[in-house]
Image (cartoon, coloured by chain):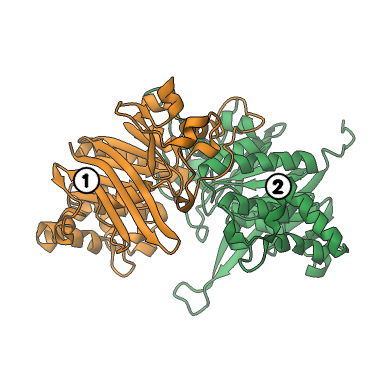
Amino acid sequence: MSEPMTEKDRPILETRSLAKRFSIGTRFSAEGRRTVHAVDNVSLTVRRGETVGLVGESGCGKSTLARCLVRLYDITDGKLLFEGDDITSKSLSELRPLRRRLQMVFQDPSASLNPRRRVGDLVAEPLRIHGKLSAKEIAARVAELFELVGLLPDHVMRYPHEFSGGQRQRVGIARAIALNPDLVVLDEPVSALDVSVQAQIVNLLADLQEKLKLTYIFIAHDLSVVRQVSTRIAVMYLGSIVEEGPAEEVFATPAHPYSQALISAVPVVETTPTGTRKRIILTGDVPSPLKPPSGCRFHPRCPIAADRCRSERPELKEYRPGRKVACHFPTLT
Amino acid sequence: MILSVRDLKVSFRTHDGPVRAIDGVSFDLEESEILGVVGESGSGKTVSLLAVMGLITDPNATIEGSIRYKGRELVGLPPRELRRLRGNEIAMIFQDPMTALTPVYTIGWQIAEQIRAHRGVSKAKAMARVEELLAEVNFPNPHEAMSRYPHQLSGGMRQRAVIAMALSCDPALLVADEPTTALDVTVQAGILDLVRKLRAKHKSAVVFITHDMGVVSELADRVMVMYAGRVVERGTRTELFSDPRHPYTRALLGSIPPLTGQKPRRLPAIPGSPPSLLRLPQGCAFGPRCPVRYEPCEAGKPGLGSGAHAAACFRVAQA
């Protein structure tokens, strides 16, 4: 039955029932010590060369999950495997050689670039830390990276403030790919950019992925950007994945009522005078991860919730190859 | 006519020389009409509306042109007079609801204070009105919400509270500056729905500033696209989205990834980035990024013309 695993199918990153909990307050605060279940029971497989898009409202745990995936956060429970190798509890020194292969790009490029150093220097830094290159080789590599991300050679001597937002994000990307990583986690990489500049960066990321055979985990709150970039989508709600599948399919036929509401809420440019799209408006707010609701965590806002949803939590089940949903009453097509 | 702005110019003196943030903006607004103002950072969309509200108090700023509210000239009006209009007949909502809320008083107290300041009613009457208003903006439990402090509410709920405050005196004009940008799409959908309902009920005219073409196409009756301090295109929603004329409008619409159908392999991107107002290019400000530029574009700045659907572009004028 099982076909031989090809290079493409082999997971580069895998999580098994991964959880991240934060403990807040002290025993002296009014409510005592409490636990935030930021990421709860996430099992996600990322294959080589694909782009997995994580979507969900703010506070759904997508950024926390991303930080767990590159071990910027310690993992509370479950397992994290990189190329089949368990890295859940590796020490910092054991992780160092891996850091080269796992990189991250953040939302605000001006916050992640030291304003007092020249950008050439900033891009060279990872090369100096990880590589055994001579100064000359480093300079050549920096020049090569600048060309790859569409910056001019004489830009190396400039400071971050001399660049526009889009160019600064190019610097952030150059730094992330300096060490030829395998996997890049992109946390809202275009959200802080002007609309007219976003498409440039989206295209640049696609070009780099093709040229350098990169695997991406892409987080953005702009759903149309996520759809454009991703091959697969995982929709998160209150710390857990509620739906997963190929990007275009999930957007065309979302199975989970939450995905349906989320996608229907995106304002799109319509040339017809009145909107033809059906919009599902959710009532209430995302519940606090301090006190998650019983049963299905979406049931207090769900338009089709039944008794079963209040008591029994649905599991994320594969109902068709490649498509998973965590709902007792999914819309299956 | 609620609002009529003619040839508005705002400039600031800075260390690096004078900056013209707004360069000749004109528009009209009728009763219960929603005008969408679209633009990127530095396009002047916020500054032009701050000027309308009389909120540019920087001593380095010069404001020229005319802003008429119900026929009354606002440019040069003493601050006392303006204060009587603001929050009463003209209301505002900003991107961050905390700019309008103080953390140290309850929501109910803050909205009631506004009503009492402008209407001089009793505290009990004002509080009763607050409860009505909170119910109108869909607070699930308005009575309880009145005793809440802003930090006890979510971002979406805070923005609703600010909208309730803005509506407290039945404004004839509501100015909303990116009110949903910091919110999730699910919450945004609710707020947009609310703005539509309120316009129908209170007959307020609304100026809605955003960078999101999708939001504008869902909400606005008429649209104004701004770039580098000037209006580059205006028209009704249908005109602008089914027949965009200015190369900037076209390019911006083209660069938005689709939510349905076939994904393009590459997005049609606009090269470069919006210009700094300190170093505006010669001629048309969009020229250096424009795919159809030709000689006249460098020689002078194209005018918008007088048509209802108009684009400030030499190519369009020629066609």
Q: Position of residue A308 (x, y in %)?
A: 52, 41
The label on residue B67 is 1
Q: In terms of image quadrants, where is residue B18?
A: bottom left
- Letter of the chain shown green in the rendering: A
**Mark 1, chain letter?**
B
Taking depth in this image into account, of B23 and A148 the one nearest to the observer is B23
B203 vs A329, left or right, is left
The answer to whether residue A27 shows anywhere in this view is: yes
Q: In terms of image quadrants, where is residue A110?
A: bottom right
Q: Position of residue B128 (x, y in %)?
A: 16, 55
SS of the residue under disc 2: loop
Q: In terms of image quadrants, where is residue A95?
A: bottom right
Residue at the image point whose x is 39% and y is 45% from the top: B229
Q: Give the distance between the C-alpha atoms of the residues marked 1 and 2, in whole angstroms.
A: 46 Å
Q: Position of residue A7 (x, y in %)?
A: 86, 39
Is residue A238 placed above or below A223 in the rendered structure? below
SS of the residue under disc 1: strand
Give the residue at mark 2.
A149
Q: Position of residue B239 (x, y in %)?
A: 37, 24
Q: What amino acid type should be assigned to the residue bearing mark 2? A: Val
The answer to whether residue A274 shows anywhere in this view is: no
**Mark 2, chain letter?**
A
How many numbered dots are placed on residues in this image?
A: 2
The label on residue A265 is none
Q: What amino acid type should be assigned to the residue bearing mark 1? A: Ile
Taking depth in this image into account, of B255 and A268 the one nearest to the observer is B255
Residue at the image point whose x is 28% and y is 61% from the top: B57
For label 2, the crowd category at 10 Å Cα-Cα, with few meaning under 14, some 14 to 19 and many 20 or more, is: many
For label 1, the crowd category at 10 Å Cα-Cα, with few meaning under 14, some 14 to 19 and many 20 or more, is: many
Residue at the image point whose x is 46% and y is 32% from the top: B249
Taking depth in this image into account, of B282 and A61 the one nearest to the observer is B282
- Letter of the chain shown orange in the rendering: B
